Image (cartoon, rainbow, N blue to C red):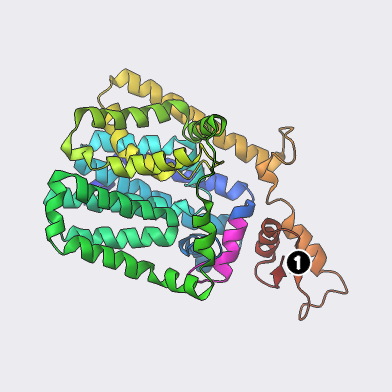
């Protein structure tokens, strides 16, 4: 039997976490991004204006399997992918360190707001990116563990799938290349065909998106890669970028993630040293860009996934009493945050500014669409719906359930 099926603590964490995430997914109406991705699923393609296709699959899998279009079925793919991400993290840390460290790594993934709720309950491109990012790290570990370069074929496959999830996965290729070029124990693999075959496999998997972009004036690449850094440095923007990362992670969890990474830098343990580019490149590059222009807080987050591999090794060495206090406090906080969002979505009890209350994004669109389509002068054969903004169009089109043309 697979070891994770025999690990009661791992099963408790992921099953309780699934119940919490699924409850929140059922209570909160879809945000405008999620509705937009749900519309992707109505029109499957190898690419979209601002993203590759995996997010459409994430959004669509629940709706395709059930035949029902709701906020909950929209999020089934996100719920399942986070289970997969947790399992890959557990397996990786189990093999690299031990069972106790693996359980703590998964635990801290489950009490970090961005990963547990943002990536674990709601639809974003990072659902699939996070899974394939960690899977790539696992296959890189298998190269190190077995000294068998054939594992680079699996590395290439998972990297190609990560690219289909989000273009930020190009940093995986950069990190792999850095490890092969600058880590002495890895250079020998450059004398074998397998790293090159893995790269070819990654490109072949990603090729449909390249062809789609070629047929659409390279629109997606021009949009995403045209977002580079600004022309002037700003300490204000730099500190803002750091603060929002701390908010997504919680400051003390961010500290432990960073400390566990610094410990590997300091001790130079070869078994873990190869992880550093996968951690430092995304965090460092996007934090640096954040000194020249505003960034979205989730851009550096894939780098922290690598740090979760290391944090379990740090935590399991602590005194049991300390670990227990941290566990109780972390669980209480993450449940409180989820309950706060869920209650606000259902009752609107907090007197928030209407523009600041994100739980309002998905409210009322089904009723609005029903009211418009019920008009006596509405001809379902010829009529179409239109809005003034793309995000409003996404909400309307998702609420409409792909019954009518919606344009902006």
The percent coordinates of residue 42 (x first, y second) are: 58, 69
The percent coordinates of residue 303 (x first, y second) are: 38, 42
Q: Secondary structure at mark 1?
A: strand
Left/right placement of residue 201 relative to residue 144 reads: right
The percent coordinates of residue 98 (x first, y second) are: 21, 37
Packing grade of label 1 (10 A; few <14, some 14-19, many >=20) is some
Left/right placement of residue 172 relative to residue 397 reads: left
Tally of numbered discs: 1
Q: Quadrant of residue 165?
A: bottom left
Residue ID for mark 1: 386
Locate the C terminus by quadrant: bottom right
Q: Residue furthest right?
A: 376
Residue 39: within the magenta?
Answer: yes
Residue depicted at 30% across the width and 39% down the height: 309
Residue in the foreground of this view, choosing between 137 and 367: 137
Residue 135: tell me if it is visible: no
Q: Main secondary structure of the magenta part?
A: helix
Residue 95: tell me if it is visible: yes
Q: Quadrant of residue 276?
A: top left
Residue 157: within the magenta?
Answer: no
207 shown above or below 103? below
Q: Residue furthest bottom?
A: 381
Residue depicted at 19% across the width and 32% down the height: 268
The stretch of residues the image draws in magenta is 34-47
146 shown above or below 212? above
The percent coordinates of residue 208 (x first, y second) are: 42, 72
């Amino acid at each position: 039997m697979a070891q994770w099926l025999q690990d009661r603590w791992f099963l408790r964490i992921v099953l309780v976490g699934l119940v919490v995430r699924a409850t929140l997914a059922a209570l909160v109406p879809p945000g405008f991004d999620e509705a937009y991705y749900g519309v992707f699923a109505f029109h499957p393609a190898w690419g979209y204006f601002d993203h590759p296709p995996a997010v459409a699959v994430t959004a669509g899998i629940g709706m395709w399997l059930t035949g029902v279009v709701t906020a909950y079925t929209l999020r089934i793919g996100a719920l399942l992918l986070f289970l997969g991400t947790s399992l890959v993290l557990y397996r990786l840390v189990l093999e690299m360190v031990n069972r106790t460290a693996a359980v703590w790594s998964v635990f801290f993934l489950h009490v970090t707001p961005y990963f547990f709720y943002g990536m674990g309950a709601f639809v974003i491109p990072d659902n699939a990116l996070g899974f394939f990012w960690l899977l790539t790290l696992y296959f890189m570990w298998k190269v190190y563990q077995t000294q068998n370069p054939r594992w680079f074929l699996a590395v290439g496959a998972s990297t190609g799938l990560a690219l289909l999830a989000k273009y930020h996965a190009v940093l995986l290729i950069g990190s792999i290349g850095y490890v092969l070029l600058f880590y002495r124990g890895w250079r020998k693999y450059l004398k074998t065909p397998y790293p090159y075959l893995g790269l070819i496999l990654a490109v072949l998997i990603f090729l449909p998106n390249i062809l789609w972009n070629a047929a659409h004036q390279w629109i997606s690449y021009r949009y995403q890669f045209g977002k580079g850094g600004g022309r002037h440095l700003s300490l204000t923007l730099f500190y803002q970028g750091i603060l929002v990362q701390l908010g997504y992670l919680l400051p003390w969890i961010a500290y432990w993630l960073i400390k566990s990474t610094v410990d590997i830098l300091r001790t130079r343990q070869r078994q873990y040293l190869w992880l550093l580019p996968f951690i430092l490149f995304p965090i460092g590059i996007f934090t640096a860009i954040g000194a020249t222009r505003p960034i979205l807080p989730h851009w550096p987050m894939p780098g922290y996934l690598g740090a979760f591999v290391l944090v379990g090794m740090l935590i399991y060495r602590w005194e049991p009493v300390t670990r227990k206090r941290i566990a109780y406090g972390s669980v209480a906080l993450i449940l409180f945050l989820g309950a706060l969002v869920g209650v606000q979505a259902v009752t609107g009890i907090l007197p928030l500014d209407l523009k600041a209350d994100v739980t309002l994004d998905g409210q009322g669109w089904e009723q609005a669409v029903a009211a418009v389509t019920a008009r006596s002068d509405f001809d379902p054969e010829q009529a179409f719906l239109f809005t003034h903004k793309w995000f409003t169009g996404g909400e309307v089109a998702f609420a409409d359930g792909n019954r009518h043309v919606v344009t902006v």
